[in-house]
Structures are given as C-alpha cells and as structure tokens.
Image (cartoon, helix red, strand yellow):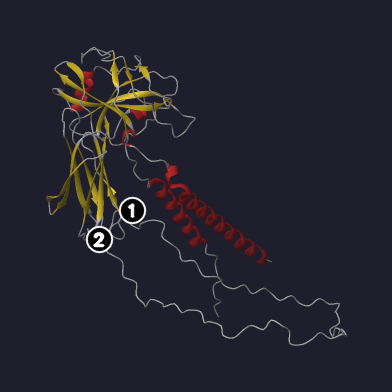
C-alpha cells in the first residue's frame, strides 16, 4: 500500500510571497508623484559683454531671493548652474556656466561669479548645439538652478530671458510663465463634475487661460477664464467614463502683455470611472426609550435582625479553579482603502494626473547632474524634478518588513523539516 506523501512546509509559497512583497516595495519606492515646479523669480546676469562669441559671455549672476532649503542639511546648495532652454522643445536644455562654490545659498539673495575653469564654450556655440545647427537668432529662457557640491540641482529655478541677434545678445524684460493644472476631485465618477484649476507662475502674470478638451481628434472649448492671483478655475460637468486613454485637457495661458510675459500651456489627463452602486436597504428607525412607570421604593421592607447569622460556607484550603476568561469578540474592523486603485491611470478607479509640459516653461533634462561640464540631454536630468524615495514613507517600510518576515519564516520551515528528517534516521 502506498503511503501518503508527507506534508511539506509551504516553503515555495512563502518564498513566492516574500518575493512579491519585495517587488511591491520596489514599485512603491519608484512610484513617486511628480512634484510641482516653482519659479523663484528672475535673476540678473553680471558683466555681460553683449557678444555671443566671447568667452565668458557674462561674469556672474545676482538673484533677488535665496535658494530653497536643501532636502539634506548636510548637502547645502553652494553654487548655481546656468542653463538655456530650447524655444522649440522645452525638454531640451544645455548648460552655459556654473558659479564658484562658496557659502550656502539658502540664507538670502546672493551674487556669485562664474567659474572660469569650467569651459562650456561660447554662447553662440551652445545655442547652436541646442537648436541643432543653423542660425540661433531668437529669444531664449535662461534658468538658474541651485546646486550642491555633489552636482545635484533643485527642480525649481530662477528664470530670465535674453534675445540673440546675429552674434550679439541682450537681456529683455519678458518673463517666462509656467502653467499647471489639477482636478478636484482627483478621481471623478461618471455623471459627476470636476473643478479644473490652472496655476500660472509668476503670480502677477496677467492674462487668460483657455480650457479645451480633446474629443474625437478635435479640440472643443470648455471655457476661457481670466487669471486672478495666479489662478483660473472652471468646472467640467456631465462626465462620462473615459477609458484607458483618459480625457486630455489643454490649458493655454495667453498673456495680456506679451512683451512682459510669455504664453504657456499644459496638457492634463482626466480619468473618469464608473460610479459605484447605490447602497440598498431600509433606513433604520430609532425607537424611543420606554418611560418608567411607578415610583421607586426608597425604604427597606424589613428591619435588621439582632443576631448575626453564621456563615454557612467554611473556607477551603484548595483554591477553586479560576475560570478561563471568555473575551467578547469585538467587531472586526473593515479595511479601508488607502488610495485610489487607479493611480496608474486606468478606468478601475482612476485618479486624474497631469501629463504634459508648459511650453517653454517646464522643460526637464540637463547634463548638469553628471558634472559641471555637461551638454544637451532631454527628459532624464534633474531639471524636470524627481521625487525622493522618502515620499513612499511607511508604505515601503511595511512592505519591506513583511517581505523579510516571510523570508525568515520560510527559512525556519526548511530548518525544521531537515531536523525532523535527521531525527528519523537510524
């Protein structure tokens, strides 16, 4: 007769669960929400020669405000990186100069000289590289990023504009704007509505924001709203389920004074999901407490006896068995969701998420993260703003600890099995 196979410890299952928890921790660590970009203000180039073919084309910079406080106080911002943004593609940036290192720049406005040992070439050469060759005439946004001694920059920046004509350049008063859009609620449902809020930087930029939705390969106007205190709002009603692609919404800022501020735009994707089922059942009706009838008796019905009664139970030497406590079962807590189930943007609980650029304003990508002598790169640099692993907080820690616990449990099961097998041998 064949003996049934002995039960094996669920090592494979535990290992699979451990690997799953580890993968979950990694995903949560990488799934960091995008950080909104802040423009600190403008800055001034010092000692400019006005020639785009002379090195250096300027000797330093002066800012009206300080750099932000560093994320790590042990790594303060001690220098600043100057970069130019392509007027054709805000994702394309080239470095122009870097200042000398010195005292931390987060204490207040600063003036700092450029490091002449860091040779980036002439302004004309760098702009030609940015444009892919040919004439470089036109207007360019320059951005000044605060940088640590280790080469990491902030996503936020100071902004200034220059105009290049032939081999000459000159600063201009025009400021670049940045437009961003958010939705409230972040995950609207079909039949509901969503309030769209566009934020325009700098805050004093006057103009209007036009909201449009892209439906069946056609832009349909939603509303044109004046900007007040840097914000413009409108409400989108009659929402229908969007599907995996979402509903693209274009917000375009048009300045009142084009010579003072540039225009900008932002593409926002709104995800609308099915509304949940309405709760069923009858509403319980409360019942009032019964009113007691009669009067309470306050006096005892019998008098006390003169002779005390002897106790009938003699104390026993043996202690009586203490009954085991029978705790009452409390209500089982119902788990609540800690976040929308569609942060990836599908229709199973979608959360609205912005996915776009602000024209010439929110470009990301820089070679500065690789050192002081960088060149053009797009999209992967630190200029676009990347989140920190700390943003996942306790969620990552919990997943990692759960993974470790399952690995240790699996190892214990293996050791126990080997010991049993060892004890069974003659």
Q: Which residue is mark 2?
A: 192
Q: Which mark is residue 45?
A: none
Dot placed on the residue nearer the N-terminal end, 2 or 1:
2
Which disc, if any, is residue 343? 1
Q: Looking at the image, which residue sits at the far bottom?
A: 302
24 lies left or right of 364: right
Residue at 23% across / 63% down in the picture? 191
> Image height check: is 329 above or below 1?
above
Viewer-side residue, 408 vs 299 = 299
The C terminus lies in which quarter of the figure? bottom right
Coordinates of residue 366 in the picture (x, y in percent): 30, 30
Crowdedness of circle 1 by 10 Å Cα count: few (<14), some, many (20+)?
A: some
Q: Position of residue 226 (x, y in %)?
A: 19, 42
Residue 233 lies, with reference to residue 101, above or below; the image says below
- Separation of marks 2 and 1 at Cα, in angstroms: 19 Å
* Viewer-nearest of discs 2 and 1: 2
Q: Residue at x 59, y 86 (%)?
A: 294
Give the total number of marks visible in the rendering.
Answer: 2
Residue 413 picture quarter: bottom right
Image point (12%, 54%), residue name: 216
**In this rendering, position of residue 255 left or right of residue 121:** left
| Quadrant of res 51 | top left
Tell me the element at label 2.
loop
In the rendered image, the quadrant that contains the N terminus is bottom right
Mark 2 residue crowding within 10 angstroms, few (<14) / some (14–19) / many (20+): some
Relative to 305, is 223 on the left or the right?
Answer: left
Which is nearer the eye, 271 or 414? Answer: 271
As helix, strand or loop, the secondary structure at mark 1 comes to loop
Please say if 348 is above or below 35: below
């Amino acid at each position: 007769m064949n003996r049934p196979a002995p039960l094996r410890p669920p090592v494979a299952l535990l290992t699979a669960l451990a690997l799953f928890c580890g993968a979950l921790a990694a995903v949560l660590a990488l799934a960091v929400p995008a950080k909104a970009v802040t423009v600190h203000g403008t800055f001034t180039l010092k000692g400019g020669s006005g020639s785009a073919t002379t090195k250096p084309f300027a000797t330093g910079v002066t800012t009206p405000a300080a750099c932000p406080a560093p994320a790590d106080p042990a790594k303060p911002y001690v220098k600043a990186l100057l970069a130019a943004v392509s007027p054709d593609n805000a994702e394309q940036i080239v470095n122009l100069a870097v200042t000398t290192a010195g005292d931390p720049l987060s204490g207040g406005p600063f003036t700092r000289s450029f490091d002449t040992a860091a040779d980036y070439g002439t302004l004309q050469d760098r702009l030609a590289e940015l444009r892919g060759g040919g004439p470089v005439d036109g207007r360019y946004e320059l951005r000044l990023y605060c940088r640590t001694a280790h080469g990491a920059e902030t996503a936020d920046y100071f902004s200034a504009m220059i105009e290049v004509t032939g081999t000459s350049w000159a600063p201009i008063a025009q400021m670049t704007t940045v437009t961003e859009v958010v939705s409230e609620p972040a995950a609207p449902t079909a039949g509901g509505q969503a309030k769209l809020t566009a934020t325009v930087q700098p805050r004093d930029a006057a103009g209007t924001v036009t909201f449009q939705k892209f439906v069946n390969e056609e832009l349909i106007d939603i509303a044109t709203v004046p900007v007040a205190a840097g914000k413009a709002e409108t409400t989108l009603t009659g929402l229908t389920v969007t599907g995996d692609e979402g509903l693209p919404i274009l917000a375009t800022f048009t300045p009142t004074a084009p010579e003072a501020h540039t225009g900008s735009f932002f593409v926002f994707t709104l995800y609308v999901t099915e509304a949940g089922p309405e709760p069923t059942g009858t509403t319980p009706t409360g019942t009032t407490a019964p009113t007691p009838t009669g009067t309470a008796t306050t006096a005892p019905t019998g008098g006390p006896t003169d002779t005390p009664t002897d106790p009938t139970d003699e104390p026993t030497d043996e202690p009586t068995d203490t009954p085991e406590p029978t705790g009452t079962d409390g209500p089982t807590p119902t788990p609540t969701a800690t976040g929308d189930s569609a942060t990836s943007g599908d229709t199973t609980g979608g959360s609205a998420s912005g996915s776009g650029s602000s024209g010439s304003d929110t470009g990301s990508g820089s070679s500065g993260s690789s050192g002081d002598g960088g060149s053009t790169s797009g999209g992967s640099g630190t200029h676009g703003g990347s989140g920190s692993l700390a943003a996942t907080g306790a969620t990552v820690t919990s997943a990692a600890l759960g993974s470790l616990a399952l690995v240790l449990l699996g190892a214990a099961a293996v050791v126990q099995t080997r010991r049993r097998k060892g004890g069974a041998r003659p």
